[in-house]
Amino acid sequence: MVAWFGDMRIIKRTISGELSLLPLFLNNVKKEGTGDLEEAMGEFSKESCPSVKNILLLDSEGKRVAVKYFSDDWSSNASKLAFEKSVFTKTLKTNARSEAEITLFDGYIVVYKFVQDLHFFVTAGDDENELIIANVLQGFSDSVGLLLRGDVEKRTALENLDLILLCIDEIVDGGIILETDANTIAGKVATNAVDGSAPFSEQTISQALATAREHLARSLLK
Protein backbone atom coordinates (compact mmCIF):
# COMPACT_ATOMS: atom_id res chain seq x y z
CA MET A 1 0.00 0.00 0.00
CA VAL A 2 1.28 3.46 -0.88
CA ALA A 3 0.19 6.51 1.09
CA TRP A 4 1.16 10.13 0.73
CA PHE A 5 2.44 12.38 3.49
CA GLY A 6 3.32 15.89 2.38
CA ASP A 7 5.84 15.58 -0.43
CA MET A 8 6.87 12.07 0.54
CA ARG A 9 5.74 8.72 -0.75
CA ILE A 10 5.28 6.37 2.17
CA ILE A 11 5.50 2.72 1.24
CA LYS A 12 4.08 0.52 3.98
CA ARG A 13 5.33 -3.01 4.06
CA THR A 14 5.18 -5.87 6.49
CA ILE A 15 8.80 -6.65 7.27
CA SER A 16 9.58 -10.32 7.82
CA GLY A 17 12.42 -12.79 7.30
CA GLU A 18 16.16 -12.28 7.41
CA LEU A 19 18.58 -12.07 4.53
CA SER A 20 21.89 -13.87 4.38
CA LEU A 21 23.69 -12.10 1.59
CA LEU A 22 27.14 -13.65 1.34
CA PRO A 23 25.98 -17.29 1.63
CA LEU A 24 23.47 -16.69 -1.17
CA PHE A 25 26.23 -15.28 -3.36
CA LEU A 26 28.62 -18.14 -2.64
CA ASN A 27 25.88 -20.68 -3.29
CA ASN A 28 25.33 -19.17 -6.74
CA VAL A 29 29.08 -19.27 -7.36
CA LYS A 30 29.14 -22.97 -6.52
CA LYS A 31 26.21 -23.72 -8.83
CA GLU A 32 27.76 -21.81 -11.71
CA GLY A 33 31.22 -23.31 -11.15
CA THR A 34 32.91 -19.93 -10.89
CA GLY A 35 36.57 -20.48 -9.97
CA ASP A 36 37.75 -20.93 -6.40
CA LEU A 37 36.61 -19.16 -3.25
CA GLU A 38 39.31 -16.49 -3.46
CA GLU A 39 38.26 -15.60 -6.99
CA ALA A 40 34.63 -15.54 -5.94
CA MET A 41 35.35 -13.25 -3.02
CA GLY A 42 37.20 -10.94 -5.37
CA GLU A 43 34.09 -10.69 -7.48
CA PHE A 44 32.03 -9.95 -4.39
CA SER A 45 33.37 -6.40 -4.42
CA LYS A 46 32.31 -3.48 -2.33
CA GLU A 47 30.35 -2.09 -5.24
CA SER A 48 28.24 -5.25 -5.47
CA CYS A 49 27.43 -5.37 -1.75
CA PRO A 50 24.25 -3.82 -0.36
CA SER A 51 25.17 -0.81 1.74
CA VAL A 52 23.69 1.93 3.89
CA LYS A 53 24.51 5.62 4.27
CA ASN A 54 23.77 5.97 7.97
CA ILE A 55 22.04 4.44 10.98
CA LEU A 56 20.26 6.84 13.33
CA LEU A 57 18.67 6.49 16.73
CA LEU A 58 16.88 9.68 17.80
CA ASP A 59 14.65 10.51 20.74
CA SER A 60 11.05 11.72 20.61
CA GLU A 61 12.27 15.30 20.11
CA GLY A 62 14.61 14.46 17.26
CA LYS A 63 17.76 14.69 19.36
CA ARG A 64 20.62 12.26 18.94
CA VAL A 65 20.89 9.13 21.03
CA ALA A 66 23.28 7.17 18.79
CA VAL A 67 24.19 7.87 15.16
CA LYS A 68 26.79 6.59 12.71
CA TYR A 69 27.43 7.81 9.17
CA PHE A 70 29.15 5.77 6.46
CA SER A 71 29.05 8.25 3.58
CA ASP A 72 30.63 11.55 2.61
CA ASP A 73 27.23 12.80 1.44
CA TRP A 74 27.11 14.77 4.69
CA SER A 75 30.57 16.30 4.98
CA SER A 76 30.03 18.38 8.12
CA ASN A 77 28.37 17.90 11.47
CA ALA A 78 25.98 20.72 10.58
CA SER A 79 24.81 18.89 7.44
CA LYS A 80 24.32 15.69 9.45
CA LEU A 81 22.24 17.49 12.06
CA ALA A 82 20.18 19.15 9.32
CA PHE A 83 19.49 15.77 7.72
CA GLU A 84 18.47 14.27 11.07
CA LYS A 85 16.10 17.17 11.71
CA SER A 86 14.58 16.82 8.24
CA VAL A 87 14.07 13.06 8.56
CA PHE A 88 12.58 13.39 12.03
CA THR A 89 10.21 16.20 11.03
CA LYS A 90 8.99 14.51 7.84
CA THR A 91 8.28 11.17 9.53
CA LEU A 92 7.01 12.40 12.91
CA LYS A 93 3.30 12.25 12.08
CA THR A 94 3.40 8.85 10.40
CA ASN A 95 2.33 5.67 12.13
CA ALA A 96 5.50 3.58 12.24
CA ARG A 97 4.94 1.77 15.51
CA SER A 98 3.12 -1.37 14.45
CA GLU A 99 5.53 -1.98 11.56
CA ALA A 100 8.41 -0.30 9.79
CA GLU A 101 7.75 2.22 7.03
CA ILE A 102 9.78 3.22 4.01
CA THR A 103 9.97 6.70 2.55
CA LEU A 104 11.77 8.14 -0.46
CA PHE A 105 12.96 11.72 -0.22
CA ASP A 106 15.99 13.84 -1.06
CA GLY A 107 17.27 11.00 -3.23
CA TYR A 108 17.50 8.46 -0.39
CA ILE A 109 15.58 5.46 0.86
CA VAL A 110 14.86 5.85 4.57
CA VAL A 111 13.38 2.97 6.55
CA TYR A 112 12.16 3.85 10.03
CA LYS A 113 10.33 2.56 13.06
CA PHE A 114 9.26 4.07 16.40
CA VAL A 115 9.59 2.16 19.66
CA GLN A 116 8.45 3.94 22.84
CA ASP A 117 10.29 7.30 22.80
CA LEU A 118 12.99 6.14 20.37
CA HIS A 119 13.00 6.60 16.60
CA PHE A 120 15.10 4.14 14.56
CA PHE A 121 16.24 5.09 11.03
CA VAL A 122 18.37 3.47 8.33
CA THR A 123 19.26 5.49 5.21
CA ALA A 124 20.48 4.10 1.88
CA GLY A 125 20.89 5.17 -1.71
CA ASP A 126 17.76 5.07 -3.86
CA ASP A 127 19.27 2.23 -5.92
CA GLU A 128 19.41 -0.15 -2.94
CA ASN A 129 16.91 -2.95 -2.36
CA GLU A 130 14.21 -1.71 0.02
CA LEU A 131 13.66 -5.11 1.61
CA ILE A 132 17.34 -5.47 2.47
CA ILE A 133 17.40 -2.03 4.10
CA ALA A 134 14.22 -2.89 5.99
CA ASN A 135 15.92 -6.00 7.32
CA VAL A 136 18.83 -3.87 8.54
CA LEU A 137 16.40 -1.69 10.47
CA GLN A 138 14.61 -4.73 11.89
CA GLY A 139 17.89 -6.29 12.97
CA PHE A 140 18.98 -3.06 14.62
CA SER A 141 15.78 -2.37 16.53
CA ASP A 142 15.28 -6.00 17.57
CA SER A 143 18.87 -6.49 18.75
CA VAL A 144 18.65 -3.29 20.81
CA GLY A 145 15.41 -4.60 22.29
CA LEU A 146 17.08 -7.90 23.19
CA LEU A 147 20.10 -6.30 24.84
CA LEU A 148 17.97 -3.77 26.72
CA ARG A 149 15.75 -6.67 27.82
CA GLY A 150 12.65 -5.08 26.33
CA ASP A 151 13.10 -1.76 28.11
CA VAL A 152 13.52 0.20 24.89
CA GLU A 153 13.40 3.84 25.95
CA LYS A 154 15.76 6.80 25.88
CA ARG A 155 16.90 6.56 29.50
CA THR A 156 17.87 2.90 29.23
CA ALA A 157 19.42 3.45 25.81
CA LEU A 158 21.69 6.21 27.13
CA GLU A 159 22.70 4.05 30.08
CA ASN A 160 23.69 1.30 27.63
CA LEU A 161 25.00 3.41 24.78
CA ASP A 162 28.07 1.20 24.42
CA LEU A 163 25.83 -1.77 23.63
CA ILE A 164 23.90 0.15 20.99
CA LEU A 165 27.02 1.43 19.24
CA LEU A 166 28.47 -2.06 19.18
CA CYS A 167 25.21 -3.34 17.68
CA ILE A 168 25.69 -0.92 14.81
CA ASP A 169 29.28 -2.10 14.36
CA GLU A 170 28.10 -5.70 14.13
CA ILE A 171 25.46 -4.82 11.54
CA VAL A 172 27.50 -2.57 9.25
CA ASP A 173 31.20 -2.10 8.50
CA GLY A 174 32.06 0.97 6.48
CA GLY A 175 28.52 1.04 5.14
CA ILE A 176 28.58 -2.60 3.97
CA ILE A 177 25.84 -4.74 5.51
CA LEU A 178 27.29 -7.65 7.48
CA GLU A 179 24.43 -9.04 9.56
CA THR A 180 20.69 -8.52 10.01
CA ASP A 181 19.69 -11.32 12.39
CA ALA A 182 18.94 -9.80 15.81
CA ASN A 183 19.86 -12.91 17.81
CA THR A 184 23.22 -13.17 16.06
CA ILE A 185 23.93 -9.48 16.57
CA ALA A 186 23.01 -9.58 20.27
CA GLY A 187 25.10 -12.73 20.76
CA LYS A 188 28.17 -11.12 19.20
CA VAL A 189 27.75 -8.03 21.37
CA ALA A 190 27.55 -10.23 24.47
CA THR A 191 30.66 -12.14 23.37
CA ASN A 192 32.62 -8.93 22.87
CA ALA A 193 31.59 -7.80 26.33
CA VAL A 194 32.95 -11.02 27.85
CA ASP A 195 36.18 -10.81 25.83
CA GLY A 196 36.75 -7.29 27.10
CA SER A 197 37.18 -5.91 23.61
CA ALA A 198 34.98 -2.93 24.45
CA PRO A 199 34.87 -0.69 27.55
CA PHE A 200 31.72 -2.17 29.07
CA SER A 201 30.70 -1.61 32.65
CA GLU A 202 30.20 -4.63 34.93
CA GLN A 203 26.44 -4.04 34.85
CA THR A 204 26.40 -3.95 31.04
CA ILE A 205 28.39 -7.18 30.78
CA SER A 206 26.00 -8.92 33.17
CA GLN A 207 23.04 -7.70 31.12
CA ALA A 208 24.54 -8.88 27.84
CA LEU A 209 25.42 -12.26 29.30
CA ALA A 210 21.94 -12.72 30.73
CA THR A 211 20.40 -11.97 27.35
CA ALA A 212 22.73 -14.39 25.59
CA ARG A 213 21.93 -17.15 28.08
CA GLU A 214 18.17 -16.60 27.73
CA HIS A 215 18.23 -16.84 23.95
CA LEU A 216 20.53 -19.85 23.98
CA ALA A 217 18.08 -21.62 26.27
CA ARG A 218 15.15 -20.71 24.02
CA SER A 219 16.94 -21.97 20.92
CA LEU A 220 17.69 -25.30 22.62
CA LEU A 221 14.04 -25.73 23.58
CA LYS A 222 12.77 -25.17 20.04
Image (cartoon, rainbow, N blue to C red):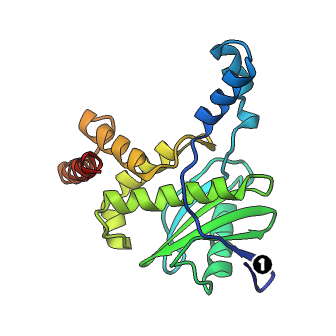
Q: Is residue 5 above or below residue 204?
A: below
Q: Is residue 65 above or below residue 32?
A: below
From the viewer's side, name the closer residue of 76 and 222.
222
From the viewer's side, name the closer residue of 47 and 38.
38
From the viewer's side, name the closer residue of 65 and 10.
10
Q: Residue at x 68, y 56 (%)?
A: 76
For the N terminus, give its image quadrant.
bottom right
Q: Secondary structure at mark 1?
A: strand
For residue 198, which quarter of the picture? top left
Q: Is residue 81 above or below residue 204?
A: below
Image location (x, y in percent) of residue 12: 67, 75
Q: Residue at x 47, y 43 (%)?
A: 170
Q: Residue at x 68, y 74 (%)?
A: 86
Amino acid carrying mark 1 in the image:
Met
Give the left or right position of residue 197, taking residue 66 as reference. left
Give the left or right position of residue 152, taking residue 208 as reference. right
Image location (x, y in percent) of residue 197: 32, 34
Query: Label 1, on which residue?
Result: 8
Image location (x, y in percent) of residue 200: 27, 46
Image location (x, y in percent) of residue 157: 36, 65
From the viewer's side, name the closer residue of 2 and 8.
2
Q: Residues within 10 Å of mark 1 (few under 14, many from 20)?
A: some
Give the left or right position of residue 185, taking residue 193 as reference. right
Give the left or right position of residue 164, taking residue 168 as reference. left
